[in-house]
Image: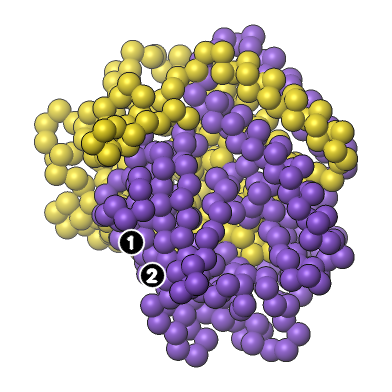
Chain colours: A purple, B yellow
Amino acid sequence: MNYQRSLGGDLVRDGSPAASGLSAASFSASELSTAGVEEVERLYGGLADDVRRLIDVTIRSAVDEDRVTQARALVRQAERLLAEQASPEPAGVHFNREGRSWDWGNAVVGVRNAIAPPVVVVRAPDGTVSSEVELGAAYEGPPGCVHGGVSALILDHLMGETASAGHTRVTVTGTLTLRYVAPIPLGRIWMRAWIADESGRKVTVVAQIGAGEVGTAPAVEATGLFIVPRWATDDGVPADIGSLD
Amino acid sequence: MNYQRSLGGDLVRDGSPAASGLSAASFSASELSTAGVEEVERLYGGLADDVRRLIDVTIRSAVDEDRVTQARALVRQAERLLAEQASPEPAGVHFNREGRSWDWGNAVVGVRNAIAPPVVVVRAPDGTVSSEVELGAAYEGPPGCVHGGVSALILDHLMGETASAGHTRVTVTGTLTLRYVAPIPLGRIWMRAWIADESGRKVTVVAQIGAGEVGTAPAVEATGLFIVPRWATDDGVPADIGSLD
């Protein structure tokens, strides 16, 4: 994590332009083939899955100090190995000429991000977007329940994906309103979102999240106003880059 | 992560009552002394810090397959060591007779949860709650920027802490409205929240989050309605257990 503050006060990432604004240039065209993308996802996605299990047991473990010390040494050794060659930059959002896009570091869907469950978004022919995911000990807020902010995090992402209409346009979140109806026990979670209204550059999306099987009563309901930024309505914007959430 | 589905369809955790509702009994009185709590936080908090660095480099690494394979073996070895003795339960929210409370698995502030940055909440004498935190590659949404849902996650938590008025009452999120004004570059983040209004069991909280130094223009503004649940207004409710977020 190498971030520097420029003299002007804007946060900049090492060797990159200031990220204080977003533009079409924020997205990186890549020479990586789709097969190459899938190879990286297999390799590092497996590692991220291992790290997810480590996060979970770090919360639940009750071993003695000696074992924790041993575990820490192993984790640090793994970190050093992986740091031997690493980008100073966050993962970003990339796309290739085959129309494949990837956002490996995304906090909700990033396959290389062990913070992300990750959510796998499913899009129905009618435009409805849905997913099911298992949320364990790392997503806790109230005792035994999903953190209310985690529901907000996941819904914001799902709604952004929905607003982007199958990754055919860029959208940013304008406003997001969440109504908390009931607590969600940790475990299996369902979610769905759909476009309720569209007008010019404004897209209104509605979403729900709940515990257990799809179709049970929603525990949190959300309405979001998403905007197609002016810069994304110009020519030269890469297609198939999805939402900005 | 051992969750089972009961015959009745409610999600239950192994060996625990159904968590489909919350009550005063959701909070666990503990015999652990405050010194004991701090010892666990030192030991496992250090491990969680190591795991946070591992999460970050798992996103940014560019080492070859051999090194990833070695790193995976080390991570799995650490996981097995920690799993030798582990609770099947999530961390929960606990308190002791000395008035100390702890929620080690909380997704925003949990010191044993490597998903949590963790945010360290500061409370001013006037009741204003604030914090500053560094958000790296694992919190990305738009390229180089904090995920909009991560801002929602953090604000929801901060606002819940604010509504709980120094952990003197239990509150749950009723509604949460977020206005996204500008993207937040990854890096140093500030946030603050305060009570705007109180009426009976309803508490209205306002919050802001932004990039860089405290006092710069907020990038996301939020208003939340928090509720003191009826069960928390009865006698016998443990004090000092904070918000339910």
Q: Nearer the viewer, residue A98 or B240?
A: A98
How would you rate the neighbour count of disc 2 (Cα within 10 Å): few for under 14, some for 14-19, many for 20 or more?
many
- The kind of secondary structure element at disc 2 is strand
Total count of labels: 2
Q: Is residue A183 left or right of residue B84?
A: left
Residue assigned mark 1: A221
Residue B176 % position (x, y): 35, 61
Residue A204 in picture, x, y percent from top left: 42, 77
Query: x%, y% of residue A45?
Result: 70, 44
Residue B20's disc number: none
Q: Residues within 10 Å of mark 1 (few under 14, many from 20)?
A: many
Callout 1–callout 2 Cβ contact below 8 Å: yes
Amino acid type of the residue that numbered disc 2 sits on in the rendered structure: Val
Q: Residue at x 38, y 14 (%)?
A: B32
Q: Is residue A56 left or right of residue A208?
A: right
Residue A95 seen from this side: yes
**Which subunit holds the residue at mark 2?**
A
> What is the number of the mark on residue A206?
2
Q: Is residue A137 above or below residue A33?
A: above
Let me know if marks 1 and 2 both belong to one chain.
yes
**Whole-percent x and y of residue A205?**
42, 73
